Image: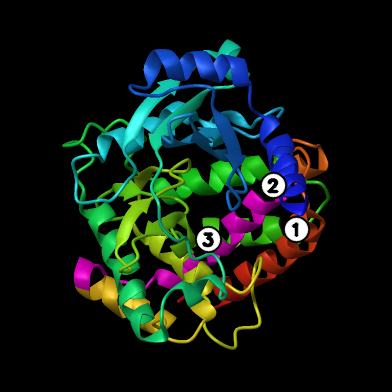
Amino acid sequence: MAEQANEAAREAEAQEGIDRDGLDGWFRANVPGAKPPLAFDRISGGRSNLTFRVTDSAGGAWALRRPPLGERLGSAHDMGREHRVISALQDTPVPVPPVIGLCDDESVNDAPFYVMGFVEGPILRSAHDAGEFPQSDRRAIGERVVDTLVQIHDVDPDAVGLGELGRKEAYVERQLKRWHGQWQKSKTRELGLVDDVHRRLSESIPDQGPATIVHGDYRLDNMILAPSGEVVAVVDWELCTLGDPLADVGLLLVYWSEPGDEFMPLFAPATSAPGFPSRENVKARYAERSGRDLSQVDFFVALGYWKLAIILEGVYARYSGGQYGRTDEGFEEFAKIVERLAQAADEAASRMG
């Protein structure tokens, strides 16, 4: 009985953001081999766009991505953009899920969405999840995370059809303007430190080298691993653009907690488990494999904390407005976390050379 009740609860949650009739018809017409009726299971983890595992009556499985419920801010939840990026990377060394199709007809499911092949494998979101792998394997996993980021930054955007994804110059200036604007639109209260860090970063922007693809939210829990620990898919490309690759490095370091860290933005991340390389090791490996100068990386760490504070303020605002439907994920703590992230951005900015 308990198992049936849990299944019913999952089904009820999946209904939010899902039009079963519309999606059954779309899959029947657009997904080769799909055999509706379909079942939908909301996948935990994503705190912006919503992700569902979709299964059919024959056991086929796909992943469906759609924006959060309700009003959305501009391009922050652009399904066409995510679909375009993943499609362009299909034949590159960067591991991404296989693309199935995009639907921008909102009459099908109330919002645009795209569908990928479902990639099986562990996602290491927490220190507990790191137990999927023995401690002796974790250093190699961390090194693969770095090496995969180097692969992303090695892709020539023009060669894969992404040369017009965004402006290549003045990346940091554009990020500061965009995210400060998002803060003004989504903030639930005044937080002066966010504005102060914005001012200090704006006055200290490093020179930008050649533009690369920038994932925009690159971290261990945005990738799916094989049982061997290989990276089989990088996901959540909604913030991808062209610009300074060190922005990805800075944000990766923000998320890369070490054992004993007191600052945990959401929970104890997987990298806080024993065995993963340190932040210094991550920086050294990226510098070695990419050949890039990381002397200004503290600027990008400060930018990463500041940007993450604004992203989570938006998540908190949408949660407060009911755009994630029913959930018990503890979003009420996000307001305090945003303040802690702003403080961390301030501390990193103080270390800038």
Task: Give the magenta part as a residue range.
Answer: 289-313
Residue drawn at x 82%, y 52% is 190
Distance, label 3 to label 2, CA atoms, is: 18 Å
- Residue type highlighted by circle 2: Val
Q: Is residue 317 or residue 210 the one in the foreground?
A: 317
Q: Identity of the amino acid at label 3?
A: Leu
Foreground pick, 334 / 178: 334
| Secondary structure under the numbered disc 1 in the rendered image | helix
| Residue 218 visible somewhere in the drawing | yes
**Could you tell me what secondary structure mostly forms the magenta stretch?**
helix
- Picture quarter containing residue 179? top right
Q: Say few, some or many: other residues with alpha carbon within 10 Å of mark 1 (under 14 / 14 to 19 / 20 or more).
A: many
Tell me if residue 108 comes above or below residue 238 in the rendering. Answer: above
Q: Disc 1 marks which amino acid? A: Phe
Q: Which mark is residue 315?
A: 2
Q: Residue 303 has which mark?
A: 3
Q: From the viewer's perspective, is the residue at label 3 or at label 1 nearer?
A: 1
Q: Secondary structure at mark 2?
A: helix
Residue 306 appears left or right of 175? right
Image spot of residue 203 (x, y percent): 52, 59
- Reading the image, the residue beneath label 1 is 334
